[in-house]
Amino acid sequence: MSSERKINFSAGPSVLPLSVLRQAADEMVNFRGTGMSVMEISHRSKAYISIFEETVADLKRLMKVPDSHEILFTHGGATLQFSAIPMNLIGKTGKADYAVTGSFSGLAMKEAKKYGDINVACSSEDRNHTYIPAQEDIKVSSDASYFHYCANNTIFGTEWKYIPETGGVPLVCDMSSNIMSFPIDVSKFGVIYAGVQKNMAPAGMAVVIIDKTLLGGELPLTPKLLSYKVTADADSMHNTPPCYVIYMLGLMMKWMDEQGGLEGMQKIKSEKAKVLYDTIDESELFVGPAEKASRSDMNVTFRTSDEELDAKFIKAATAAGFENLKGHRLVGGMRASIYNAMPFEGVEKLAAFMREFEKNR
């Protein structure tokens, strides 16, 4: 980690590996002898098609995406998928189930209400989203077109530690903030979608992994570029895709390979999270609002008992080179987002700073 770079705990856009940034910089002006930047190459050119196909293949291999599922690259990030999901899927019965365990799942549910009848299958709002409901607390509707949940809650610092059982109802998961941080059985999901700006690439795109049997059921009002079938039929190139983001995603796939794939990423992220949670649990000053069984390995939330002291900590941390530790405005306190590219050294330095701050307060 370069001494000139800040230690960036942003919840997104998030830190990227220095080696990836350097390779992108090296190829910025002249990509592989083309005499052009990736940002200038036609998306229909042989040079760009090779980038695209290699990126798709690497993503499929790393996530072990079965042939039953299609990988789509879409515009608009995860938020646009809040509309695309019901537009493409709710038409089967006109109904859908949503688990509301944080801000973004709540926003997704509100958007879905424009297109059909929505049942709140479970919610953690009663304890300010500090926990994930147990399987037995989920009320799945047998006639739901799909069941939607958000795997990791960036604002509240909670994470689903299991895949919900839905009795055959297609499972739709927003994995924006923990995708590719651990291996997962993709075949269990009807749709996995993720904004790429946390664990996968710079901002500007979403990845959608969809069971091919769910293609073609979009509502008549669905805009062409929000139709999963149109996107799949055009191999994500019905119009110009987010070319540079896809290129950067490809570089990130190579980097994850070097870390040992998703098994390697899981080991690293668990070790990073343990360092911070051990520091919080051993502290008499800092507390973690998320219940221990539901703690996120991606977004570590913590606070003191005093908002003024929280502000002093954030100010001191910023002066010491730690960026973006202020908690979301909905919850306050502090938040350290430790996505895939956050170096272990950065987490160790933050833990040491927290201990020193407590010692000197």
Image (cartoon, rainbow, N blue to C red):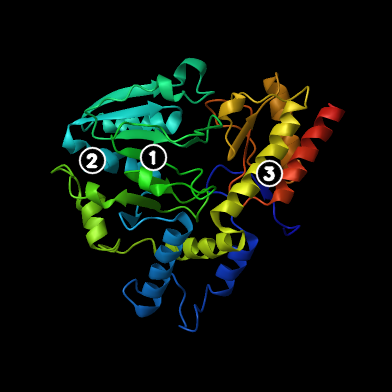
Q: Which residue is mark 3?
A: 271
Residue visible at 36% across and 56% down in the picture: 66
Mark 1 or mark 3: whose residue is earlier in sequence: 1
Q: Position of residue 350 (x, y in %)?
A: 74, 41
Q: Which residue is mark 2?
A: 89
Percent position of residue 62, x then y: 48, 58
Please state the horizontal and vertical placement of residue 234, each as a whole percent of the image: 24, 63
| Residue 214 visible in this rendered orientation of the protein | yes
Q: Quadrant of residue 284?
A: top right
The secondary element bearing badge 2 is classed as: helix
Question: How many residues crowd mark 3 within 10 Å: few (<14), some (14–19), many (20+)?
Answer: some
Type of residue at label 3?
Answer: Glu
Instruction: Tell which tag, 3 or 2, sits nearer the viewer.
Output: 3
At x 51%, y 61%, the residue is 253
Give the CA separation, mark 3 to mark 2. 38 Å
Q: Earlier in the sequence, mark 3 or mark 2?
A: 2
Q: For residue 295, what is the image quadrant?
A: top right
How far apart marks 1 and 2 lie (CA) works out to 13 Å
Q: Amino acid at mark 1?
A: Cys
Residue 69, labelled with which disc?
A: none
Q: Position of residue 157 (x, y in %)?
A: 56, 32
Q: Nearer the viewer, residue 269 or 76?
A: 269
Q: Is residue 199 left or right of residue 321?
A: left
Q: What amino acid type should be assigned to the residue bearing mark 2?
A: Leu
Q: Which residue is mark 1?
A: 173
